């Protein structure tokens, strides 16, 4: 939009005039801008630098550099002329800095541009990290490396480094944060406002902020004190810019204050800025296109006259920079670049603003004695457009041993010229859609021109000069063959047919934030216009942006069979095809339990078809039916729930979505029969495979490898042993039948409610004492877990229940209820009787959610297991299980984990697994009952033996369901605010040792989860916990947890043992005031 020098002499960096001093007095005030920046904590160097840009803006100066004021830059040395000898001592004085503040919004990206894949699976940041590591190895020196991130790129970048290059991530000073500056109203020059998203009021100040960031952060002084003298700076998207020891030697020996790497301009570069000499003082400067008067445009584009352009690879003497800063009252003045925008970049009708930036290369005019050096094009390989990305991803470039991007020898030093439709492929997502099947070969290509929408593949080979046109509105496939010196018009060719995607306009729908187990709402909400489609598209966009190639491998789809599942499955398939999915695995009848999905992802092959993720259609234990709840969640390639980073990305996408992709003509798939459907495009070049798989096979086979089915069968066949397993008309029914009837030879009378129904037969498929009332009565108990009179009716020896999606369990003995917390502890204490654990040398690690009782802690302490307390949510357990495999950390497996909400499991999958827990208990019972001639050792016997050894954690959970959300949130906020006051307070016979809101620091990846539950930890070890559940379909569920440990008194009635603590809890939360009741819906 415009390029202006800092206020002062039009051409000089360090002088001013009386005329401009008078002008400054009449300028709009900078006070409100300074106040806003100070309130944000921005350092004085950045504030002063921005004031310089502000003064240039309001002064009205043109900033033009006429041809008459400059001369061509001549006599510039080339790298081939370097004679200086390298001294290894230079390395200890050198710091390498990559500028990593850009989001790449101009290419349709919304995260750090350096996280874009550029070659194979390697991103810019991958290759940069590998370059640094290799450089240090080759040079035998730990050359200092740092990144200048922006407030927009810092979190993504550091998370990536922590996950993939932890050694670099942990280095001192790895990150320096770029400052941020306010956007300014175009009319008033006052700071812009954006009430809908205050973050939009700020913008990055351009890479010229390097100097202000170095100064204001104290990094410049620290580097100088550390003995550093030379800084090499380059952009993160320029993989050709590595530390060259010859250039370093030249710079160091020349005693230059500043050196710019330049390349010789070609016809492709004539519109870009050039290096020149200012006539008034013989100073090297840069002239950008916005600084050239119209009448001088012909000279500006004359590459024979102005022969060199700036690569933005810069060498800076840090001591000289310090001198300039000190001479200019704490900052380095730079020319200002003005960009006209809107305050909300996604809303063209929002406030019109200016974004002021500076360029770091412009500092060349501030350094006396600045120089330049001509470098080969191999040191300049940035990606600014999809043309560049196309070229670098092709076989015309390769990765060198030191991880630079280089042209292959076959190209003889001349890169192919790539020109793809700038309107159709301005944005990376559009380009990646066109190349979803791979990038064509360009190794023998001179020029490739593409106009219109196309689909390409790695089977295409362009040779010589090729031009391809498609004037139709439908994408056409470029033939997957060799195309040599040809002009091809695809307009009238056959298209994609049923595989053709259409773009449907939509708009954001509020409230699509996934909870700990996905997105759950009323079924009719999901059935509303675009509700499901918006979420699914947001998920696909996030998954692809996270680096997953959805065209490779398989996508799993299944669910718990609730109402609307069949329609949702067809929608996801059609949208999946439109988003590039080539293979689907769908559970027969649309059924797949949540643990079975995890098993399918992890276990099903062959390897080239292996699943990378899954959509699970479930609201778990919530009721089903047209008036009840529906849900959807995404699981990743490890079989576990999507991590916070991915669900956050999905949610952000739902807030800005404008369209979704769908193949409306893709045929409906018959999911009632196991088999494969292949749908091909009309042009015959592509196809999609939908395979309907047996819902139970993979999971059951995995369970058979974990447990000793023969010994369990021997237990089940005993005359004095009977069992009943209630699937509550959820998806678990087919799995229960496959295991207990088909594999273990039991009669169907050992199962109840095992036929899945879309409304769970009108019940609430939640396996607890309240909702599994039919089973509870059969087992001789009431809803409080107390024994009832069963008369002459024989009570089964063992009872169990599953929830709607099969991941939860309830364990019962004859007239005996096992709490989930005790169940976890007992399984952990007896893990060695399960072959899966015994064969691997025994259990190593255990984990529980924070609200779960500490019963398993006692087992862990006694048996020496690693113990973890995590927030509620199975994804936290998954990280611990994958510590070694995915993160290269400690191996905690074999591993058992559980939650008080009837979830138990191990590292065989990455979800809780209800039927696994049932079989674990039966395996323990079988091991205790090896001699059939002896009396049966019961569930009650096992639990009481456990209490006798470890003591008893008296425990209960009260659920207040359907509470007013605002009232519930206000209640929690009040307890959070009173945490400090409550700490040390005496309540009844208890003293609150600690009151806080649980924070979890993940020991595997270092991530931090805050506000995960209000805790009152008593001095005697008793606990009161409050948590809002994020999985309810409507309203809010307040969960209150009460726990008291007794080392020896194990025979108390739970309600009596906890009566005083319950009263204390109700007083502390004051739920009667906030939510209007003290009566829970469910007590467990």
Image (cartoon, rainbow, N blue to C red):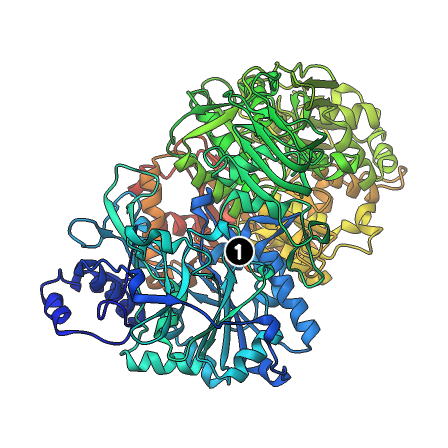
**How many numbered marks have been drawn onto this rendered protein structure?**
1
Does residue 153 appear to the left or right of 82 in the view shown?
left
Q: In the rendering, at what x and y percent does residue 348 appear?
A: 29, 37
Q: In the rendering, at what x and y percent does residue 393 appear?
A: 63, 46
Crowding at dot 1, Cα within 10 Å, few <14 / some 14-19 / many 20+, comes out as: many
Residue at image coords 28%, 46%: 343
Q: In the rendering, at what x and y percent does residue 699 appear?
A: 75, 33
Q: Which residue is mark 1?
A: 237
Question: Does the rendering let one see residue 1038?
Answer: yes
Q: Nearer the viewer, residue 334 or 823?
A: 334
In the depicted structure, whether residue 227 falls above or below residue 870: below
User: Which quadrant of the view contains residue 394?
Assistant: top right
User: Which quadrant of the view contains residue 654?
Assistant: top left
Q: In the rendering, at what x and y percent does residue 537 appear?
A: 50, 31
Q: Nearer the viewer, residue 157 or 987?
A: 157
Residue at image coords 20%, 49%: 186
Q: Nearer the viewer, residue 443 or 823?
A: 443
Label 1 sits on a secondary structure element that is: loop
In the depicted structure, whether residue 545 falls above or below residue 55: above
User: Which quadrant of the view contains residue 71?
Assistant: bottom left
Does residue 730 appear to the left or right of 892 in the view shown?
left
Q: Nearer the viewer, residue 19 or 738?
A: 19
In the depicted structure, whether residue 818 falls above or below residue 1001: above
Residue at image coords 22%, 64%: 34
Question: Does the rendering let one see residue 785?
Answer: no
Residue at image coords 67%, 24%: 586
């Amino acid at each position: 939009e415009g390029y202006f020098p800092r206020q002062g002499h039009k051409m000089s960096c360090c002088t001013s005039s009386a005329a401009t001093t008078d002008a400054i007095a009449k300028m709009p005030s900078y006070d409100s801008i300074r106040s806003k920046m100070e309130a944000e904590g921005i350092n004085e160097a950045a504030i002063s630098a921005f004031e310089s840009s502000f003064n240039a803006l309001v002064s009205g100066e043109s900033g033009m550099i006429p041809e008459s004021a400059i001369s061509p830059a001549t006599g510039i040395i080339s790298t081939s002329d370097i004679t200086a000898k390298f001294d290894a001592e230079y390395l200890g004085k050198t710091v390498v800095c990559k500028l990593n503040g850009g989001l790449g919004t101009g290419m349709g990206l919304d995260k750090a541009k350096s996280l874009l894949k550029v070659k194979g699976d390697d991103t810019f940041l991958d290759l940069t990290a590998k370059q640094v590591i290799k450089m240090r190895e080759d040079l035998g020196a730990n050359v200092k490396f740092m990144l200048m991130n922006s407030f927009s790129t810092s979190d993504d970048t550091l998370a990536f480094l922590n996950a993939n290059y932890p050694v670099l991530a942990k280095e001192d000073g790895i990150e320096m944060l770029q400052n941020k500056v306010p956007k300014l109203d175009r009319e008033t020059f006052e700071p812009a406002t954006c009430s809908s998203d205050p973050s939009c009021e700020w913008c990055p100040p351009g890479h010229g902020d390097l100097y202000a960031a170095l100064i204001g952060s104290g990094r410049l002084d620290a580097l100088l004190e550390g003995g550093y003298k030379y800084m090499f700076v380059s952009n993160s998207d320029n993989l050709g810019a590595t530390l060259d020891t010859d250039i370093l030697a030249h710079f160091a020996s020349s005693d230059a204050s500043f050196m710019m790497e330049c390349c010789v301009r070609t016809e492709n570069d004539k519109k870009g800025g050039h290096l020149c000499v200012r006539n008034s003082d013989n100073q090297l400067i840069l002239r950008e296109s916005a600084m050239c008067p119209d009448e001088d445009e012909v000279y500006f584009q004359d590459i024979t006259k102005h022969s060199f352009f700036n690569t933005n690879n810069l060498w800076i003497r840090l001591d000289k920079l310090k001198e300039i800063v000190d001479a200019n009252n704490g900052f380095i003045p730079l020319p200002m670049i003005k960009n006209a925008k809107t305050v909300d970049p996604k809303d063209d009708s929002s406030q019109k603003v200016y974004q002021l930036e500076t360029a770091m290369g412009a500092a060349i005019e501030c350094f006396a004695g600045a120089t330049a050096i001509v470098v080969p094009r191999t040191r300049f390989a940035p990606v600014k457009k999809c043309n560049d990305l196309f070229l670098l991803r092709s076989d015309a470039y390769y990765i060198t041993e030191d991880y630079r991007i280089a042209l292959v020898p076959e190209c003889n030093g001349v890169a192919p010229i790539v020109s793809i439709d700038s309107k159709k492929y301005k944005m990376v997502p559009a380009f990646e859609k066109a190349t979803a099947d791979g990038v064509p070969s360009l190794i023998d290509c001179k020029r490739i021109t593409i106009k219109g929408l196309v689909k390409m593949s790695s089977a295409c080979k362009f040779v010589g000069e090729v031009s391809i046109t498609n004037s139709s509105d439908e994408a056409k496939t470029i033939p997957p063959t060799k195309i040599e010196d040809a002009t091809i018009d695809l307009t009238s060719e056959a298209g994609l047919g049923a595989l053709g995607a259409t773009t449907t306009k939509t708009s954001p729908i509020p409230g699509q934030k996934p909870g700990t187990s996905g997105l759950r709402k009323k079924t009719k909400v999901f059935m509303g216009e675009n509700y499901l489609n918006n979420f699914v598209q947001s998920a696909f966009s996030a998954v692809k942006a996270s680096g997953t190639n959805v065209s490779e491998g398989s996508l799993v789809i299944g669910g718990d069979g609730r109402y609307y599942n069949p329609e949702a499955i067809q929608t996801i398939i059609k949208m999946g095809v439109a988003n590039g999915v080539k293979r689907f695995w769908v559970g027969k009848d649309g059924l797949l339990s949540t643990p079975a999905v995890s098993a399918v992802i992890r276990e099903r092959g062959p390897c080239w078809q292996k699943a990378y993720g899954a959509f699970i259609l479930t609201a778990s234990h919530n009721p089903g039916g047209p008036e009840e709840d529906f849900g959807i969640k995404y699981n990743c390639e490890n079989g576990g729930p999507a991590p916070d980073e991915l669900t956050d990305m999905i949610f952000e996408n739902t807030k800005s979505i404008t369209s979704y992709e769908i193949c409306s003509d893709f045929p409906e798939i018959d999911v009632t029969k196991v088999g494969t459907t292949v749908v091909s495009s009309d042009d015959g070049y592509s196809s999609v495979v939908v395979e309907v798989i047996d819902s139970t096979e993979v999971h059951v086979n995995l369970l058979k490898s974990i447990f000793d089915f023969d010994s369990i069968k021997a237990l089940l066949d005993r005359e004095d042993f009977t069992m009943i397993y209630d699937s509550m008309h959820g998806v678990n029914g087919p799995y229960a039948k496959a295991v207990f009837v088909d594999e273990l030879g039991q009669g169907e009378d050992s199962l109840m409610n095992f036929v899945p129904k879309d409304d769970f037969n009108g019940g609430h498929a939640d396996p607890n004492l309240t909702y599994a009332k039919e089973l509870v009565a059969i087992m001789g108990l009431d809803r409080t877990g107390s024994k009832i009179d069963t008369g002459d009716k024989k009570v089964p020896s063992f009872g169990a229940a599953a929830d709607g999606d099969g991941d939860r369990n309830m364990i019962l003995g004859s007239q005996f209820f096992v709490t989930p917390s005790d169940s976890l502890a007992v399984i952990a204490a007896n893990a060695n009787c399960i072959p899966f654990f015994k064969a691997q040398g025994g259990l190593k690690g255990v984990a529980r959610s924070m609200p779960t009782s500490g019963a398993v802690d006692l087992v862990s302490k006694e048996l020496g297991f690693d113990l973890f307390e995590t927030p509620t949510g199975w994804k936290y357990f998954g990280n611990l299980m994958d510590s070694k495999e995915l993160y290269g950390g400690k191996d905690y497996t074999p591993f058992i984990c559980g939650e008080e909400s009837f979830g138990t499991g191990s590292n065989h999958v990455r979800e809780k697994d209800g039927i696994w827990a049932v079989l674990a208990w039966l395996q323990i019972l079988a091991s205790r009952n090896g001699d059939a001639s002896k009396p049966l050792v019961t569930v009650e016997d096992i639990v009481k033996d456990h209490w006798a050894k470890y003591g008893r954690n008296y425990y209960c959970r009260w659920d207040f369901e359907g509470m007013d959300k605002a009232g519930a949130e206000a209640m929690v906020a009040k307890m959070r605010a009173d945490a400090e006051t409550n700490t040390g307070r005496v309540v009844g016979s208890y003293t609150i040792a600690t009151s806080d809101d649980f924070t979890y620091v993940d020991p595997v990846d270092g991530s931090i989860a805050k506000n995960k539950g209000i805790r009152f930890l008593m001095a005697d070890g008793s606990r009161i916990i409050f948590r809002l559940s994020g999985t309810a379909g409507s309203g809010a569920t307040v969960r209150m947890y009460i726990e008291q440990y007794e080392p020896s008194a194990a025979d108390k009635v739970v309600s009596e043992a906890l009566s005083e603590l319950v009263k204390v809890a109700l007083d502390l939360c004051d739920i009667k005031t906030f939510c209007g009741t003290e009566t829970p819906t469910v007590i467990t």
